[in-house]
Each structure stands twice: as structure tokens, then as C-alpha cells.
Image (cartoon, rainbow, N blue to C red):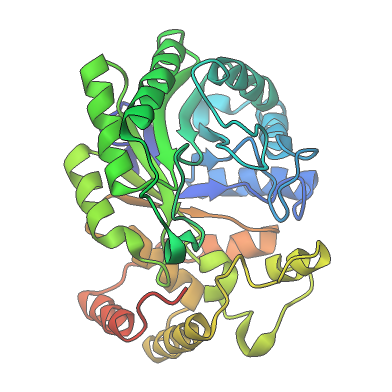
Amino acid sequence: MKTVALGNSEVMVSDVSLGTMTYGNQTGLADALIQMDRALDAGITFFDCAEMYPVNPVRRETAGRSEEFIGEWVAKSGKRNQVQLASKISGPGPRLRDDGFNGANIGPAIEDLLRRMKTDVIDLYQLHWPQRGSYAFRQNWGYDASGQDKAATIAHMEDVLGALMAAVEAGKIRAIGLSNESAWGTTRWVDVADRMGAPRMVAIQNEYSLLDRKFDTDLAEAAVNEGVTLLAYSPLAAGLLSGKYQNGERPAGSRAAVDVEFGGAGDLSGRITAHSLAAVAAYQALAAELGLDLVQMAIAFTRQRPFRCIPIIGATNVGQLDHLLAGLNLVLSDDQLARIEALHRAHPMTY
């Protein structure tokens, strides 16, 4: 496992991250503790979480439970100094705080996070959603930025960066990052930080996979030029790239099946479409032709992008995690990558 820096910071992490968003819901404590041990044994030292986790569904009464599971592992293992912990503060909406985050509530939120994770410092603290709105999670189809107020956005950034700078200076957090951000937002956060002498954003956690490659153009350019590392969530497209949802299947215990149990559509938040299923079938056929496992091919693809990209791999159980870990030595050849690019042209914007 390689070790890389987050952006231009001194925070060094493994080039694969363990996602924990199912801990406390689909994944029980015993399984979660084994997963963290198993990941660390495989060389993954970077664990990602968020205060709104677990997901599927997101509920106020369970928010923070995933962080508490990590805290239990920290306390039981005694290995806090061997890992880097990341989490996020929730943005506006029906998550934790209806008015989102600001300079006044970031400090208390960090204190709550440190208590749940049983640590005195968080290595990467991320802003989960842009306060002004986001096109993430299929909102791109009707995204309208025409009502945004640039002056208000910049003032908000100054307010938030002031609080984050204070937390860094107090030794509560080491580095800061974004999530579900745009190219414009990313560059503005960096510009405002430079003007204030505040810490720069060093990471951006956005969705990225064989099926969702919106990051490839403007965001990749911004990330390369501003020294921002992509933390790619849903590198398996929420399980679509496992092939388990083909032909209308919704396996028991799967994310889609659990979503239906809680009154959802069971479409992986809009990811399951005729276009995406056709693309998965094409990638399945390619992987079979190349003699590769599709899940492992998909993760290897994200690790070989021309921009700095760390996939976040998550599993609801240890068996799924073992399958992912078994493929971490896979390196795709130039010819194999070219075959993937040809399929991407044939199946763009699948959801």
C-alpha cells in the first residue's frame, strides 16, 4: 500500500481509504471492529466517516453512531497512532442541523466528534455539503445556480475558515477538506483561505467511479492546479459495479433492499437506470474477457487516474471487505485502461 500526502499538507495517508458509513446500521459493532483490524493489517490506515452516518437511511437519532464505532475500535485496539481519521460536518437539510454549518457551530461539532471518536485530534475534517447547494446525488439534471449570492457565499467561507483555522491552531484538526463540491467552489475556498492566511482545502470527497466520471474535467483541473486530492466515494457506484442489481435483482440485505424496507425506491438514490445497467453489463463483459474481477477492476481504475485519487472502499460485512482487499495489488495495463475508455465513450453519463 502506498502512502501519499493529502494535497499540500503534512497529513500522510494510505492510497486507499476504509469507508464506515454502514457502521451502526447494516454493519454491527463486532463486524465493524473486525473490518478495521482487517483493513489495517492490509495497509489501509485512512478511515473515513461523517457525523450524519450511518446512512441508508440517514436518521437524526442514529447520527454519530458510525463515529462511535470507530471510537470503540480506537479504545479497544490502542492503535490510534497507526491510523488517520477523517470525518465531516453536515450541511443544511434534514440531517443534523437545519441551518447547516457556520463559524459558531463548527467548534462544538468538532468537540462532539472528538468525544465520539475517543481521540484528541482529527486528521481530516471535511464540509459535507456546500451551504449554497450542490449538484451531487443526481441533482445535476436540474441544477440551477442562478439564485446564488456570491458575496454571501464568500462571507460564509470567511466565517467557516476562521473557525477551522482556530481549530487547527488549537490542535483539534490537522487538515481540512470538502465534499460534494464544484470546481468553482473548490477554487473559491482556496482563494479565500490564501487571502486570510487560513488553512487550504487539501481534499475533496466526491462521487467517482466507472459509472460517474463528472470529476474528470473542470474538477480535475481545479484539483491538479490547487493541490487538492480526490477522495472518491462510491467507487463501485453504491454496489452497481458488483453486478448484483442486474436483471431487477435486489439481494436481501443489500443497500437497495434496505432502502425499500424504509420506504425508499430501491434505486440507489437514482443510480439504477436502464443506462447504468447497460453500462454495468458492458463492464462485466470486459472484465470477463480480460480475466479480471469487475469489483477489483473498478477499484484499480480509480487508483490509476492522472489526478491524485484515493478510493474509499466500504463493505457491509467482512466477506465483502476481504474481496476488495484481495484485489488491491491489481494494476491495469495501458491496453486495459484503453478498453475501459472505449466503454466510457459508449456509456457516458449513465445516471
Q: Give the image quarter of residue 250.
A: bottom right
- Residue 272 in the image, given as x and y percentages of width and height: 58, 76
Counting from the top left corner in percent of width and height, residue 122 is at 51, 24
Q: Residue at x 69, y 34 (%)?
A: 73
Q: Tell me what residue is drawn at x 22 percent, y 22 percent.
A: 194
Q: Position of residue 207 (x, y in %)?
A: 45, 57
Q: Residue furthest front?
A: 147
Please tell me in which quadrant of the rendered image residue 37 appears: top right
Which residue extends farthest top? 170
Q: Residue at x 70, y 46 (%)?
A: 54
Q: Is residue 126 above or below residue 326?
A: above
Q: Is residue 18 above or below residue 344?
A: above
Residue shown at 68% from the left, 29% from the top: 71
Question: As displayed, is residue 109 above or below residue 269?
Answer: above
Say whether residue 288 is left or right of residue 268: left
The x and y percentages for residue 152 are 38, 28
- Picture mark count: 0
Q: Nearer the viewer, residue 175 or 62?
A: 62
Residue 228 visible to the viewer: no
Rendered position, 186 above or below 160: below
Nearest to the observer: residue 133 or residue 48? 133
Residue 148 visible: yes
